[in-house]
Image: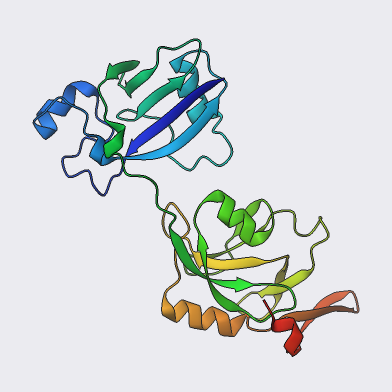
Amino acid sequence: MTDIRIYQIDLDRDNDGVAFEPYGNLARYQGSPDVNPALYDKVFDGAVDASDIEDIYRIFNAEKPEGYEGRSLSVSDVVEIVKTDDIKPGFYYCDSIGFKPVLFDAEHVKEPENEKITVVMLEPGKVARTAEIGTSLADLQKAVGGMIEAYYPFEEEVCIVCNDEGKFNGMSPCRAVYDPEGRMMDIIFGPCFICDCRGENFGSLSQDQIKRYTEQFRNPEHYFRIGGEIRAEPYEPKVHDLSR
């Protein structure tokens, strides 16, 4: 196993436009050939099964480790080899062809922040509520009790994030989803949340969206079958059901 760290340029801090540029273009764009660590975020710190740096490139393009939230490894990214028997430790700039050893002061890299998003949280047997959850994969999975799945039943760019095995792993039904004519399209099982999905990552709802979706999905539902058709009846939870 090879212990590595991966650093990628934060596009919002890249005022000189050096992201995705080969090493030879740095001087032209930023006036210096040196890699500027202040532009970079650390997006991975762990061990991978790699015997050379090309293995690392392949892993972070075709076989991304579980929990990795960075971009596919690309030009301008920096790979730090921390500990291995096969690759010389140091920093390597991903160039247009291969990797170039570079000087890189990792102390100036920005550590990832534990960002949070504001969502409408839906849980079986409980009223809808506003919640703040972390954006890491672990935080999202914790919110739904397992692997996540995004469901897009709305006309606006908002989605329901739920447990992708909720219907099969014994979770309780949570909320039904209806089309504009009021016909039931699906039933979500297990806890889920509604969030913005306009960007590359899940985001916060606006105050108007929070109000609308909290009202729309406020109460949990009882489900029953009449004449082969599944029906839902909203109900007001008892006081002890509201404890958190």
Is 57 above or below relative to 208? Answer: above
Q: Residue furthest left?
A: 31
Q: Front-most of 78 and 106?
A: 106
> Which residue does the image show at 57% across and 21% down from the upper left?
49
Residue 118: percent from left, percent from top: 47, 69
Image quadrant occupied by the C terminus: bottom right
Residue 60, visible in the rendered structure? yes
Q: Front-most of 85 and 22?
A: 85
Residue 131: percent from left, percent from top: 54, 72
- Looking at the image, residue 87 sits to the left or right of residue 40; the answer is right
Query: How many numbered discs sit on the rendered protein?
Result: 0
- Looking at the image, residue 227 sits to the left or right of residue 20; the answer is right
Q: Front-most of 65 and 186?
A: 65
> Which residue does the image show at 49% across and 78% down from the upper left?
210
Image quadrant occupied by the N terminus: top right
Is 115 above or below relative to 73? Answer: below
Q: Residue furthest front?
A: 107
Residue 110, by quadrant, is top left
> Which residue does the image show at 45% across and 16% down from the upper left?
54
Colouring convention used in this rendered image of the protein: rainbow
Residue 243, by quadrant, is bottom right
Residue 236: percent from left, percent from top: 73, 89
- Looking at the image, residue 96 sits to the left or right of residue 176; the answer is left
Residue 235, visible in the rendered structure? no
Q: Residue furthest right?
A: 227
Residue 81, by quadrant, is top left
Is 125 above or below relative to 141? Answer: below
Is 219 above or below relative to 134? Answer: below
Q: Residue furthest top?
A: 86
Residue 71: percent from left, percent from top: 42, 38
> Which residue does the image show at 33% across and 21% down from the upper left?
92
